[in-house]
Amino acid sequence: MSAQADRMGRLVADLLSLSRIELNEHIPPSGRVDLDRAAADVVDAVSVLTQEKQVQVVVDQGENRASISGDRDEILQVVQNLLDNAVKYSPKGGVVEIAVRSDLSFDEAWASRVPGATRLPLVTPDRAVGLLYAAVTVRDHGPGMAREHLPRLTERFYRVEGQKSGERQGTGLGLAIVKHIINRHQGGLMVESAPGMGTAFTAWFPMAVDRRDVRNAA
């Protein structure tokens, strides 16, 4: 009963969160977020969970600052939802890898991170000339997924049949929330997976443009 009450509480919280995000999805975010710092903050925030699961999280950050235009709370939610999934589907003693890269072209942001796995776009932004992106990739080494499951991953309440996510069951809304946040930020989302190869999600966002550069270009 306690476990079901906990799951119900998380389900209500996720539904409220999804409703708020949908209401603001048409409003472009006006803030600025350091994607690399956001990833580091999320890793610190879930350290208790990773220690309990005995999963090691390895963070690989690029040399350049990954500054993007965005809502910090929502960007944190994207990274946390992707990391939560990776930890849940990782075996005890496993490793989850987080990589942050900046100054990427559209094709570089979309490039494969897991050779040999099936790659599928879940959110694809319009291609803009000269726009650079910052990307965060979260990869686990769990059971992976068959190709037919990938297109439905961002559907609400969709669960991959036969996969176990540990003692703490998810709400089935995490990736739906991620999708709507990325849509609002005009970014992209890609999944790569195959049975026995684990799963990698890459979320990428337009990098922030310095107003002084815009004036100089004009």
Image (cartoon, helix red, strand yellow):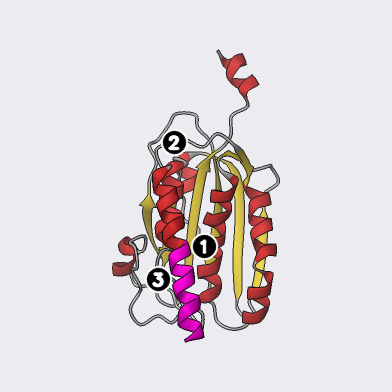
| Magenta stretch holds residue 61 | no
Q: Which quadrant of the structure image shows residue 138?
A: bottom right
Q: Earlier in the sequence, mark 3 or mark 1?
A: 1
Residue type (three-letter) at the residue carrying disc 3 = Ala
The image quadrant where one finds the C terminus is: top right
Instruction: For mark 3, give the secondary structure.
Output: loop
Q: On residue 186, which mark appears?
A: none
Residue type (three-letter) at the residue carrying disc 2 = Ile
Label 3 Cα crowd, 10 Å radius (few <14 / some 14-19 / many 20+): some
Q: Which residue: 42% across, 55% down?
A: 18
Instruction: For mark 2, give the secondary structure.
Output: loop
Label 2 Cα crowd, 10 Å radius (few <14 / some 14-19 / many 20+): few
Q: Are marks 3 and 2 in contact (CB under 8 Å)?
A: no
Task: Kindly identify which residue carries mark 1.
Answer: 82
Q: Earlier in the sequence, mark 3 or mark 2?
A: 2
Task: Kindly identify which residue carries mark 2.
Answer: 27
Residue 101 makes an appearance in the image: yes
**Magenta segment boundaries in residue numbering:** 1-13
Between residue 55 and residue 115, name the one nearer to us.
55
Front tag of 2 and 1: 2
> Outermost residue toward the top?
218
Q: Earlier in the sequence, mark 2 or mark 1?
A: 2
Q: Which residue: 44% across, 57% down?
A: 16
- On screen, residue 35 versus residue 105, left or right, reads right
Q: Which residue: 52% across, 62% down?
A: 81
Q: Are marks 2 and 1 in contact (CB under 8 Å)?
A: no
